Amino acid sequence: MADQISFVLVVFTVAVALLHFIHRWWNIHGGRKRSNNEENQEARLPPGSTGWPLIGESFSFYRSMTRNHPRKFIDDREKRYNSDIFISHLFGRRVVVSADPQFNKFVLQNEGRLFKAQYYESFKTLIGNYGLLSVHGDLQRKLHGIAVNLLRFERLGVDFMEEIQSLVHSTLDRWAEMKDIALQNECHQMILNLMAKQLLDLSPSKETTEICGLFVDYTNAMLSIPIKIPGSNYAKGIKARQLLIRKISEMIKERRNHPQVLHNDLLAKLLEEGSLSDEIICDFILFLLFAGHETSSRALTSAIKFLTYCPEAVEQMQKEHDAILKIKGVHKLEWEDYKSMKFTQCVINETLRLGNFSLAISREATKDITVKDYLIPKGSMILVVLAATHLRESSYTEALIFNPWRWEPDQDVSNNVLFTPFGGGGRLCPGYHLAKLELALFLHIFVTRFRWEALGNDRTSYFPLPYLTEGFPIRLHCRQ
Protein backbone atom coordinates (compact mmCIF):
# COMPACT_ATOMS: atom_id res chain seq x y z
CA MET A 1 0.00 0.00 0.00
CA ALA A 2 2.82 2.40 0.87
CA ASP A 3 4.47 1.86 -2.55
CA GLN A 4 1.22 2.55 -4.36
CA ILE A 5 0.68 5.79 -2.45
CA SER A 6 4.28 6.87 -3.12
CA PHE A 7 3.84 6.27 -6.85
CA VAL A 8 0.61 8.26 -7.00
CA LEU A 9 2.15 11.15 -5.10
CA VAL A 10 5.18 11.24 -7.42
CA VAL A 11 2.97 11.21 -10.51
CA PHE A 12 0.79 13.90 -8.97
CA THR A 13 3.84 16.06 -8.25
CA VAL A 14 5.01 15.86 -11.86
CA ALA A 15 1.50 16.60 -13.11
CA VAL A 16 1.26 19.85 -11.16
CA ALA A 17 4.75 21.11 -11.99
CA LEU A 18 3.37 23.19 -14.86
CA LEU A 19 0.69 24.61 -12.60
CA HIS A 20 3.46 25.68 -10.21
CA PHE A 21 5.07 27.93 -12.82
CA ILE A 22 1.68 29.27 -13.91
CA HIS A 23 0.90 29.99 -10.27
CA ARG A 24 4.19 31.88 -9.78
CA TRP A 25 3.66 33.90 -12.96
CA TRP A 26 0.14 34.81 -11.86
CA ASN A 27 1.36 35.96 -8.45
CA ILE A 28 3.99 38.20 -10.06
CA HIS A 29 2.10 39.51 -13.10
CA GLY A 30 -1.59 38.76 -12.89
CA GLY A 31 -2.62 38.58 -9.25
CA ARG A 32 -4.92 41.21 -7.85
CA LYS A 33 -3.46 43.88 -5.59
CA ARG A 34 -3.98 43.12 -1.93
CA SER A 35 -5.36 45.70 0.46
CA ASN A 36 -3.27 47.04 3.33
CA ASN A 37 -5.56 45.16 5.74
CA GLU A 38 -4.89 41.86 3.94
CA GLU A 39 -1.13 42.47 3.98
CA ASN A 40 -1.19 43.31 7.70
CA GLN A 41 -3.26 40.20 8.41
CA GLU A 42 -0.87 37.95 6.50
CA ALA A 43 2.08 39.42 8.39
CA ARG A 44 0.49 38.16 11.63
CA LEU A 45 -0.14 34.64 10.40
CA PRO A 46 1.92 31.79 11.84
CA PRO A 47 5.17 31.16 9.95
CA GLY A 48 5.31 28.42 7.36
CA SER A 49 5.32 27.42 3.74
CA THR A 50 2.60 26.12 1.47
CA GLY A 51 5.15 24.30 -0.71
CA TRP A 52 4.09 23.35 -4.22
CA PRO A 53 0.61 24.31 -5.48
CA LEU A 54 -2.00 21.65 -4.77
CA ILE A 55 0.45 19.04 -3.45
CA GLY A 56 2.06 21.46 -0.99
CA GLU A 57 4.12 19.59 1.61
CA SER A 58 2.06 16.41 1.42
CA PHE A 59 4.92 14.21 0.26
CA SER A 60 7.22 15.34 3.10
CA PHE A 61 4.43 14.69 5.58
CA TYR A 62 3.74 11.28 4.09
CA ARG A 63 7.42 10.23 4.19
CA SER A 64 7.65 11.24 7.84
CA MET A 65 4.55 9.25 8.76
CA THR A 66 5.60 6.08 6.92
CA ARG A 67 9.24 5.93 8.09
CA ASN A 68 8.59 5.14 11.74
CA HIS A 69 9.24 8.68 12.93
CA PRO A 70 6.02 10.73 12.86
CA ARG A 71 7.67 13.70 14.58
CA LYS A 72 10.25 14.35 11.84
CA PHE A 73 7.90 16.54 9.80
CA ILE A 74 7.10 18.53 12.95
CA ASP A 75 10.73 18.67 14.20
CA ASP A 76 12.07 20.01 10.91
CA ARG A 77 9.58 22.86 10.83
CA GLU A 78 9.81 23.71 14.52
CA LYS A 79 13.55 24.23 14.02
CA ARG A 80 13.05 26.15 10.78
CA TYR A 81 10.39 28.54 12.12
CA ASN A 82 11.22 28.45 15.85
CA SER A 83 7.53 27.82 16.47
CA ASP A 84 5.38 24.79 17.28
CA ILE A 85 2.47 26.38 15.40
CA PHE A 86 3.04 26.82 11.67
CA ILE A 87 1.33 26.87 8.29
CA SER A 88 1.58 24.04 5.79
CA HIS A 89 -0.31 22.72 2.77
CA LEU A 90 -1.40 19.09 3.09
CA PHE A 91 -3.45 16.99 0.68
CA GLY A 92 -4.99 19.85 -1.22
CA ARG A 93 -5.60 22.34 1.57
CA ARG A 94 -3.73 24.99 3.51
CA VAL A 95 -3.68 24.09 7.20
CA VAL A 96 -2.40 25.48 10.48
CA VAL A 97 -0.42 22.67 12.13
CA SER A 98 -0.23 22.75 15.93
CA ALA A 99 2.19 20.77 18.09
CA ASP A 100 1.63 23.11 21.04
CA PRO A 101 -0.05 21.14 23.89
CA GLN A 102 -1.70 24.20 25.48
CA PHE A 103 -3.14 25.44 22.19
CA ASN A 104 -4.22 21.89 21.32
CA LYS A 105 -6.13 21.70 24.59
CA PHE A 106 -7.67 25.12 23.89
CA VAL A 107 -8.86 23.94 20.47
CA LEU A 108 -10.36 20.70 21.81
CA GLN A 109 -12.03 22.41 24.80
CA ASN A 110 -13.70 25.03 22.61
CA GLU A 111 -15.44 22.66 20.23
CA GLY A 112 -18.75 24.22 19.17
CA ARG A 113 -17.76 27.71 20.34
CA LEU A 114 -14.62 28.73 18.48
CA PHE A 115 -13.96 25.58 16.46
CA LYS A 116 -15.85 22.79 14.74
CA ALA A 117 -14.79 19.36 13.52
CA GLN A 118 -13.66 19.43 9.90
CA TYR A 119 -12.47 16.54 7.76
CA TYR A 120 -11.89 15.96 4.08
CA GLU A 121 -15.03 15.31 2.03
CA SER A 122 -13.79 11.87 0.95
CA PHE A 123 -13.57 10.83 4.60
CA LYS A 124 -16.98 12.28 5.47
CA THR A 125 -18.52 10.39 2.54
CA LEU A 126 -17.46 7.15 4.22
CA ILE A 127 -18.40 8.25 7.75
CA GLY A 128 -21.89 9.36 6.64
CA ASN A 129 -24.00 12.39 7.46
CA TYR A 130 -24.60 11.28 11.05
CA GLY A 131 -21.30 9.73 12.07
CA LEU A 132 -20.00 11.44 15.22
CA LEU A 133 -17.29 13.24 13.25
CA SER A 134 -19.80 14.66 10.75
CA VAL A 135 -22.45 16.18 13.02
CA HIS A 136 -22.31 19.50 14.87
CA GLY A 137 -24.23 21.51 17.44
CA ASP A 138 -27.15 20.07 19.39
CA LEU A 139 -27.24 16.80 17.42
CA GLN A 140 -23.53 16.16 18.06
CA ARG A 141 -23.97 16.82 21.77
CA LYS A 142 -27.01 14.53 21.89
CA LEU A 143 -25.34 11.63 20.05
CA HIS A 144 -22.12 12.01 22.00
CA GLY A 145 -24.10 12.06 25.25
CA ILE A 146 -25.94 8.87 24.27
CA ALA A 147 -22.64 7.13 23.46
CA VAL A 148 -21.06 8.30 26.73
CA ASN A 149 -24.05 7.04 28.70
CA LEU A 150 -24.06 3.65 26.96
CA LEU A 151 -20.32 3.19 27.52
CA ARG A 152 -19.90 4.91 30.86
CA PHE A 153 -17.45 3.56 33.41
CA GLU A 154 -20.13 2.23 35.78
CA ARG A 155 -21.83 0.06 33.13
CA LEU A 156 -18.75 -1.71 31.83
CA GLY A 157 -18.56 -4.27 34.61
CA VAL A 158 -22.22 -5.20 34.14
CA ASP A 159 -22.57 -5.11 30.35
CA PHE A 160 -19.16 -6.03 28.94
CA MET A 161 -16.72 -7.83 31.24
CA GLU A 162 -17.99 -11.39 30.89
CA GLU A 163 -18.58 -11.04 27.15
CA ILE A 164 -15.06 -9.74 26.49
CA GLN A 165 -13.44 -12.55 28.48
CA SER A 166 -15.46 -15.27 26.78
CA LEU A 167 -14.58 -14.05 23.31
CA VAL A 168 -10.87 -13.56 24.12
CA HIS A 169 -10.62 -17.06 25.61
CA SER A 170 -12.29 -18.69 22.59
CA THR A 171 -10.05 -16.71 20.22
CA LEU A 172 -6.88 -17.63 22.10
CA ASP A 173 -7.93 -21.31 22.11
CA ARG A 174 -7.75 -21.13 18.32
CA TRP A 175 -4.43 -19.28 18.44
CA ALA A 176 -2.97 -21.99 20.67
CA GLU A 177 -3.72 -24.59 17.98
CA MET A 178 -2.23 -22.41 15.23
CA LYS A 179 0.97 -21.55 17.16
CA ASP A 180 2.23 -19.15 14.45
CA ILE A 181 -0.09 -16.18 13.87
CA ALA A 182 -0.09 -12.78 12.17
CA LEU A 183 -1.04 -10.89 15.32
CA GLN A 184 -2.32 -7.72 13.68
CA ASN A 185 -4.82 -9.52 11.44
CA GLU A 186 -5.92 -11.79 14.26
CA CYS A 187 -6.54 -8.86 16.61
CA HIS A 188 -8.52 -7.06 13.91
CA GLN A 189 -10.78 -10.10 13.53
CA MET A 190 -11.19 -10.63 17.27
CA ILE A 191 -12.16 -7.02 17.95
CA LEU A 192 -14.51 -6.97 14.97
CA ASN A 193 -16.31 -10.04 16.35
CA LEU A 194 -16.46 -8.36 19.75
CA MET A 195 -17.83 -5.07 18.37
CA ALA A 196 -20.40 -6.93 16.23
CA LYS A 197 -21.64 -8.67 19.40
CA GLN A 198 -21.65 -5.52 21.55
CA LEU A 199 -23.30 -3.27 18.97
CA LEU A 200 -25.59 -5.64 17.03
CA ASP A 201 -25.81 -8.82 19.16
CA LEU A 202 -24.22 -10.83 16.34
CA SER A 203 -22.56 -14.13 17.25
CA PRO A 204 -20.21 -15.84 14.77
CA SER A 205 -22.33 -17.02 11.83
CA LYS A 206 -22.54 -16.86 8.04
CA GLU A 207 -24.14 -13.40 8.33
CA THR A 208 -21.38 -12.21 10.66
CA THR A 209 -18.73 -13.48 8.23
CA GLU A 210 -20.41 -11.56 5.39
CA ILE A 211 -20.59 -8.37 7.47
CA CYS A 212 -16.92 -8.79 8.45
CA GLY A 213 -15.97 -9.09 4.78
CA LEU A 214 -17.83 -5.90 3.94
CA PHE A 215 -16.27 -4.16 6.92
CA VAL A 216 -12.76 -5.05 5.69
CA ASP A 217 -13.53 -3.32 2.37
CA TYR A 218 -14.98 -0.38 4.28
CA THR A 219 -11.92 0.09 6.52
CA ASN A 220 -9.53 -0.40 3.57
CA ALA A 221 -11.23 2.55 1.91
CA MET A 222 -10.47 4.67 4.97
CA LEU A 223 -6.78 3.87 4.42
CA SER A 224 -6.76 4.40 0.65
CA ILE A 225 -6.33 7.26 -1.81
CA PRO A 226 -9.87 8.64 -2.37
CA ILE A 227 -10.15 7.96 -6.10
CA LYS A 228 -13.65 6.80 -6.99
CA ILE A 229 -12.99 4.64 -10.03
CA PRO A 230 -14.35 1.09 -10.50
CA GLY A 231 -12.21 -1.47 -8.71
CA SER A 232 -10.39 1.02 -6.47
CA ASN A 233 -10.34 0.46 -2.71
CA TYR A 234 -12.22 3.72 -2.22
CA ALA A 235 -15.01 2.71 -4.62
CA LYS A 236 -15.24 -0.74 -2.99
CA GLY A 237 -15.48 0.96 0.41
CA ILE A 238 -18.35 3.19 -0.65
CA LYS A 239 -20.24 0.15 -1.98
CA ALA A 240 -19.46 -1.78 1.23
CA ARG A 241 -20.79 1.12 3.29
CA GLN A 242 -24.07 1.08 1.36
CA LEU A 243 -24.46 -2.66 1.96
CA LEU A 244 -23.58 -2.37 5.66
CA ILE A 245 -26.12 0.43 6.14
CA ARG A 246 -28.73 -1.71 4.38
CA LYS A 247 -28.02 -4.65 6.70
CA ILE A 248 -28.25 -2.49 9.83
CA SER A 249 -31.51 -1.00 8.50
CA GLU A 250 -32.90 -4.51 7.98
CA MET A 251 -31.99 -5.41 11.58
CA ILE A 252 -33.86 -2.35 12.81
CA LYS A 253 -36.99 -3.32 10.86
CA GLU A 254 -36.74 -6.90 12.09
CA ARG A 255 -36.59 -5.77 15.71
CA ARG A 256 -39.52 -3.41 15.32
CA ASN A 257 -41.55 -6.23 13.76
CA HIS A 258 -40.65 -8.63 16.60
CA PRO A 259 -40.44 -6.53 19.78
CA GLN A 260 -40.86 -9.64 21.95
CA VAL A 261 -37.31 -10.78 21.05
CA LEU A 262 -34.95 -9.20 23.55
CA HIS A 263 -31.40 -8.08 22.72
CA ASN A 264 -28.69 -6.83 25.04
CA ASP A 265 -26.68 -4.60 22.71
CA LEU A 266 -26.19 -0.94 21.84
CA LEU A 267 -28.67 -1.07 18.95
CA ALA A 268 -31.42 -2.10 21.37
CA LYS A 269 -30.57 0.82 23.64
CA LEU A 270 -30.61 3.26 20.71
CA LEU A 271 -34.04 2.01 19.65
CA GLU A 272 -35.27 2.46 23.22
CA GLU A 273 -34.18 6.09 22.99
CA GLY A 274 -37.10 6.63 20.61
CA SER A 275 -36.06 10.04 19.28
CA LEU A 276 -33.53 9.01 16.61
CA SER A 277 -34.33 8.36 12.95
CA ASP A 278 -33.25 5.10 11.33
CA GLU A 279 -30.72 6.98 9.18
CA ILE A 280 -29.09 8.50 12.27
CA ILE A 281 -28.99 5.13 14.06
CA CYS A 282 -27.43 3.37 11.05
CA ASP A 283 -24.67 5.98 10.61
CA PHE A 284 -24.09 6.10 14.36
CA ILE A 285 -23.73 2.31 14.70
CA LEU A 286 -21.38 2.08 11.71
CA PHE A 287 -19.22 4.88 13.07
CA LEU A 288 -18.97 3.24 16.50
CA LEU A 289 -18.09 -0.05 14.82
CA PHE A 290 -15.27 1.62 12.88
CA ALA A 291 -13.92 3.77 15.72
CA GLY A 292 -14.05 1.02 18.34
CA HIS A 293 -12.52 -1.56 16.04
CA GLU A 294 -9.64 0.58 14.80
CA THR A 295 -8.50 1.88 18.20
CA SER A 296 -8.75 -1.37 20.14
CA SER A 297 -7.34 -3.76 17.56
CA ARG A 298 -4.28 -1.60 16.90
CA ALA A 299 -3.72 -1.07 20.63
CA LEU A 300 -3.76 -4.82 21.31
CA THR A 301 -1.19 -5.49 18.60
CA SER A 302 1.07 -2.62 19.64
CA ALA A 303 0.98 -3.60 23.32
CA ILE A 304 2.26 -7.09 22.51
CA LYS A 305 4.89 -5.67 20.16
CA PHE A 306 6.18 -3.24 22.80
CA LEU A 307 6.22 -5.97 25.46
CA THR A 308 8.08 -8.34 23.13
CA TYR A 309 11.13 -6.09 23.29
CA CYS A 310 10.80 -5.26 26.99
CA PRO A 311 11.22 -8.57 28.90
CA GLU A 312 11.36 -6.77 32.27
CA ALA A 313 7.82 -5.47 31.67
CA VAL A 314 6.63 -8.94 30.61
CA GLU A 315 8.04 -10.43 33.82
CA GLN A 316 6.30 -7.82 35.98
CA MET A 317 3.05 -8.25 34.03
CA GLN A 318 3.14 -12.03 34.53
CA LYS A 319 3.73 -11.68 38.26
CA GLU A 320 0.76 -9.33 38.57
CA HIS A 321 -1.59 -11.51 36.53
CA ASP A 322 -0.39 -14.85 37.88
CA ALA A 323 -1.25 -13.55 41.35
CA ILE A 324 -4.76 -12.63 40.18
CA LEU A 325 -5.14 -16.00 38.45
CA LYS A 326 -4.05 -17.87 41.59
CA ILE A 327 -6.88 -16.25 43.53
CA LYS A 328 -9.56 -16.51 40.81
CA GLY A 329 -8.79 -19.98 39.49
CA VAL A 330 -11.18 -20.84 36.66
CA HIS A 331 -13.62 -18.08 37.57
CA LYS A 332 -14.08 -15.03 35.36
CA LEU A 333 -12.53 -11.76 36.42
CA GLU A 334 -14.74 -9.20 38.14
CA TRP A 335 -14.57 -5.42 38.32
CA GLU A 336 -12.37 -5.38 41.43
CA ASP A 337 -9.86 -7.64 39.68
CA TYR A 338 -9.66 -5.17 36.80
CA LYS A 339 -9.07 -2.28 39.20
CA SER A 340 -6.25 -4.22 40.89
CA MET A 341 -4.15 -4.33 37.69
CA LYS A 342 -1.87 -1.45 38.71
CA PHE A 343 1.17 -2.15 36.52
CA THR A 344 -1.07 -3.15 33.62
CA GLN A 345 -2.58 0.34 33.65
CA CYS A 346 0.95 1.76 33.33
CA VAL A 347 1.56 -0.53 30.34
CA ILE A 348 -1.73 0.62 28.79
CA ASN A 349 -0.89 4.31 29.24
CA GLU A 350 2.52 3.81 27.67
CA THR A 351 1.03 1.82 24.79
CA LEU A 352 -1.46 4.61 24.09
CA ARG A 353 1.27 7.28 24.31
CA LEU A 354 3.77 5.54 22.05
CA GLY A 355 1.20 3.94 19.73
CA ASN A 356 -0.62 7.20 18.88
CA PHE A 357 -3.74 5.54 17.52
CA SER A 358 -5.35 8.95 17.05
CA LEU A 359 -2.47 10.70 15.33
CA ALA A 360 -4.11 14.07 14.67
CA ILE A 361 -7.50 15.78 14.81
CA SER A 362 -8.88 18.35 12.35
CA ARG A 363 -10.80 21.45 13.35
CA GLU A 364 -12.00 24.58 11.56
CA ALA A 365 -11.87 28.00 13.21
CA THR A 366 -15.36 29.54 13.27
CA LYS A 367 -13.96 32.92 14.39
CA ASP A 368 -10.67 34.78 14.14
CA ILE A 369 -8.35 33.37 16.82
CA THR A 370 -5.24 34.95 18.31
CA VAL A 371 -2.59 32.67 19.82
CA LYS A 372 1.05 33.58 20.62
CA ASP A 373 0.54 36.88 18.75
CA TYR A 374 -0.43 34.92 15.63
CA LEU A 375 -3.76 35.44 13.91
CA ILE A 376 -5.59 32.32 12.77
CA PRO A 377 -8.37 33.60 10.49
CA LYS A 378 -11.92 32.35 10.54
CA GLY A 379 -12.30 29.36 8.22
CA SER A 380 -8.75 28.10 8.74
CA MET A 381 -8.29 24.35 9.02
CA ILE A 382 -6.24 23.41 12.10
CA LEU A 383 -4.43 20.10 12.38
CA VAL A 384 -4.07 19.27 16.09
CA VAL A 385 -1.17 16.78 16.10
CA LEU A 386 -1.61 14.78 19.30
CA ALA A 387 1.37 12.54 18.52
CA ALA A 388 3.70 15.55 18.46
CA THR A 389 3.28 16.02 22.23
CA HIS A 390 3.37 12.29 23.03
CA LEU A 391 6.72 11.90 21.25
CA ARG A 392 8.37 15.18 22.29
CA GLU A 393 11.61 14.75 24.26
CA SER A 394 10.84 17.77 26.43
CA SER A 395 7.57 16.12 27.47
CA TYR A 396 8.82 12.54 27.93
CA THR A 397 12.43 11.52 28.51
CA GLU A 398 13.53 9.08 25.79
CA ALA A 399 10.13 9.59 24.21
CA LEU A 400 10.60 6.92 21.52
CA ILE A 401 11.37 4.20 24.10
CA PHE A 402 8.66 2.00 25.61
CA ASN A 403 8.91 2.64 29.35
CA PRO A 404 5.79 1.82 31.41
CA TRP A 405 7.63 2.77 34.62
CA ARG A 406 7.38 6.44 33.65
CA TRP A 407 3.75 6.23 34.86
CA GLU A 408 2.65 6.05 38.49
CA PRO A 409 0.12 3.37 39.55
CA ASP A 410 -3.38 4.91 39.83
CA GLN A 411 -2.04 8.07 38.17
CA ASP A 412 -4.84 10.45 37.16
CA VAL A 413 -4.14 11.44 33.55
CA SER A 414 -7.55 12.94 32.78
CA ASN A 415 -6.30 16.55 32.90
CA ASN A 416 -2.79 15.95 31.60
CA VAL A 417 -2.34 18.20 28.53
CA LEU A 418 0.70 16.13 27.55
CA PHE A 419 -1.36 12.92 27.28
CA THR A 420 -4.42 13.03 25.01
CA PRO A 421 -4.71 9.64 23.26
CA PHE A 422 -8.51 9.92 23.05
CA GLY A 423 -8.79 13.60 22.12
CA GLY A 424 -10.62 15.91 24.49
CA GLY A 425 -13.38 18.42 25.03
CA GLY A 426 -16.88 17.86 23.65
CA ARG A 427 -15.62 15.18 21.27
CA LEU A 428 -13.63 13.12 23.77
CA CYS A 429 -13.82 9.50 22.58
CA PRO A 430 -16.92 8.09 24.34
CA GLY A 431 -15.52 4.56 24.30
CA TYR A 432 -12.14 5.19 25.92
CA HIS A 433 -13.07 3.34 29.15
CA LEU A 434 -14.19 0.34 27.08
CA ALA A 435 -10.97 0.38 25.03
CA LYS A 436 -8.84 0.30 28.19
CA LEU A 437 -10.96 -2.50 29.66
CA GLU A 438 -10.63 -4.59 26.49
CA LEU A 439 -6.87 -4.08 26.49
CA ALA A 440 -6.47 -5.00 30.18
CA LEU A 441 -8.57 -8.17 29.94
CA PHE A 442 -6.80 -9.26 26.76
CA LEU A 443 -3.36 -8.74 28.33
CA HIS A 444 -4.41 -10.69 31.43
CA ILE A 445 -5.49 -13.72 29.40
CA PHE A 446 -2.61 -13.48 26.91
CA VAL A 447 0.31 -13.23 29.37
CA THR A 448 -1.07 -15.94 31.67
CA ARG A 449 -1.55 -18.38 28.80
CA PHE A 450 1.43 -17.73 26.52
CA ARG A 451 5.08 -17.02 26.09
CA TRP A 452 5.85 -15.71 22.61
CA GLU A 453 8.55 -14.61 20.21
CA ALA A 454 8.58 -12.36 17.14
CA LEU A 455 9.16 -14.12 13.82
CA GLY A 456 10.91 -11.21 12.13
CA ASN A 457 11.53 -7.51 12.22
CA ASP A 458 8.57 -5.20 11.76
CA ARG A 459 8.10 -1.47 11.66
CA THR A 460 5.24 0.93 12.21
CA SER A 461 3.77 3.21 9.55
CA TYR A 462 1.59 6.02 10.87
CA PHE A 463 -0.19 6.93 7.65
CA PRO A 464 -3.10 7.24 7.51
CA LEU A 465 -3.50 5.22 10.72
CA PRO A 466 -0.77 3.39 12.68
CA TYR A 467 -0.22 -0.16 11.48
CA LEU A 468 2.60 -2.72 11.46
CA THR A 469 3.77 -3.15 7.90
CA GLU A 470 4.36 -6.92 8.19
CA GLY A 471 1.41 -7.67 10.49
CA PHE A 472 3.74 -8.65 13.37
CA PRO A 473 3.96 -12.45 13.01
CA ILE A 474 4.66 -14.26 16.30
CA ARG A 475 5.09 -17.81 17.57
CA LEU A 476 3.14 -18.79 20.65
CA HIS A 477 4.24 -21.22 23.39
CA CYS A 478 1.71 -22.29 25.98
CA ARG A 479 2.83 -21.65 29.56
CA GLN A 480 2.71 -24.54 31.98
Image (cartoon, rainbow, N blue to C red):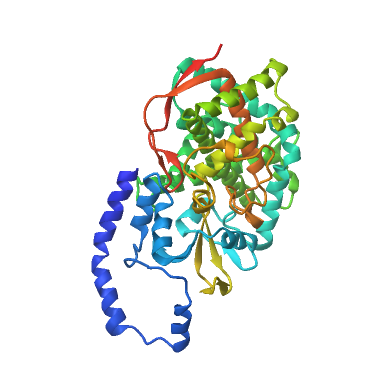
Q: Number of numbered discs present?
A: 0
Residue at 50% across / 35% down in the picture? 302
Of the 4 image quadrants, the one containing the N terminus is top left
- Note whether residue 446 is visible: no
| Residue 105 visible here | yes
In this rendering, position of residue 332 left or right of residue 71: right
Q: Residue at x 52, y 52 (%)?
A: 394
Residue 20 x %, y %? 27, 70
- Closer to us: 192 or 172: 172
Kindly give the residue lying farthest to the top in the view shown: 480
**Quarter of the view holding residue 205:** top right
Residue in the foreground of this view, choosing between 121 and 296: 296
Instruction: Determine which quarter of the picture holds residue 137.
Output: bottom right
- Image quadrant where one finds the C terminus: top right
Residue at position x 38%, y 51% in the image: 64
Give the left or right position of residue 8, taking residue 224 as reference: left
- Across and down, in percent, residue 263 comes to 71, 33
Q: Is residue 480 above or below residue 202?
A: above
Q: Is residue 268 left or right of residue 53?
A: right
Between 345 and 261, the one lying in front of the other is 345
**Where in the figure is residue 345, as x and y percent of width and height?**
63, 35
